[in-house]
Image: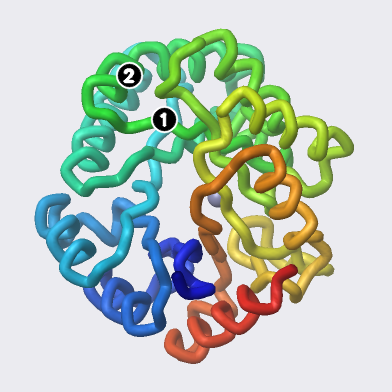
Amino acid sequence: MTDLAKLAIHTMTTKPWSLAKSVDAFARAGVGGITVWRQHLLPYGAAEGARMIKAAGLTCTALCRGGFFPARDATGRQAAIADNRRAIADAHALGAPMLVLVCGAVPELPLMESRSMIEDGIRAIEPEARAAGVALAIEPLHPQYAADRSAITTLGEARRLCERIASPWVRIALDVYHVWWDPEVGDEIARCGSAGLTAGFHICDWRVPTRDPLNDRAIMGEGVIEVAALRRQVRAAGFAGFDEVEIFSDELWAQDQDAVLARIIAAYRSLD
Ligand code: ZN
């Protein structure tokens, strides 16, 4: 096993590349896994995507993303559920073990309403996920996105949501970018781990100052998140899956992607 065997990279990290280009470059670099975003999968379709990933010897770690359940009316909520069902089918065809859920929020709706729509939405699609063998990985997002991207903001809230639904197919994607600030993060990593809820682990770093709330994430080691320490805690709590590098960065997307990939791999090797 190489030191990169448990490294996976999100196709959004190398957003300017096509899925084919990312698959080829990640495999050449010795990276073990790839997390596929739907916009990169779209030009190929899930069957072709699965074929390319398998031929390259990569493991497909997840499909991103489903969710966005809250909507102003029933038609919108039904459309979201239908879209999530399509995403589950694509994840299954792609060979992805999980579909990551960015749960959604609507600025005009009270947060508690959004939260109940999220729970209703996940309950509605759980049977399809179970039948497809695709876990639904709830990703709590940093509270800066609470109004418009995710009304689920902490690991504790995601864990309680999982415990209420009580399905082995409803679990959590833990992203250091979203949870590093939480004074409860260590306790929640332990609770989620011992309950078998941690399905995915995403890494990047928090730049200071952050110039853009969405697209200014940094490579591990270039910000303030204690990535290595969090990874030790996640592993000590029983997680044995991939370290998925997920970096949204206008700055990095504007650069040569081969050079960015080399920097990411060097940074990954420097963790610990
Ligand atoms: Zn993430």
Instruction: Report how far apart the C-alphas of labels 1 and 2 lie in the structure.
Output: 9 Å
- Decide: few, some or many residues near mark 2? Use Cα within 10 Å; few <14, some 14-19, many ≥20: some
Q: Secondary structure at mark 2?
A: helix
The residue under label 1 is 136
Residue 103: x, y in percent?
51, 31
Task: Tell whether 228 sits left or right of 30.
Answer: right
Above or below for 191 versus 2:
above
Quarter-of-image position of residue 266? bottom right
- Quick one: 127 or 234, which is closer to the camera? 234
Q: Are marks 1 and 2 in contact (CB under 8 Å)?
A: yes
The residue under label 2 is 125
Identity of the amino acid at label 1?
Answer: Leu
Above or below for 119 versus 205:
above
- Quick one: 179 or 191, which is closer to the camera? 191
Quarter-of-image position of residue 160? top right
At 71% from the left and 44% from the top, the residue drawn is 236
Task: Tell whether 224 sits left or right of 78.
Answer: right
At 62% from the left and 23% from the top, the residue drawn is 195
Residue reaching furthest to the front? 1
At 88% from the left and 38% from the top, the residue drawn is 183
Nearer the observer, disc 1 or disc 2? Answer: 1
Above or below for 253 versus 32:
below
Residue 116: x, y in percent?
55, 11
- Decide: few, some or many residues near mark 1? Use Cα within 10 Å; few <14, some 14-19, many ≥20: many
Labels 1 and 2: the sequence-earlier one: 2
Residue reaching furthest to the right? 183
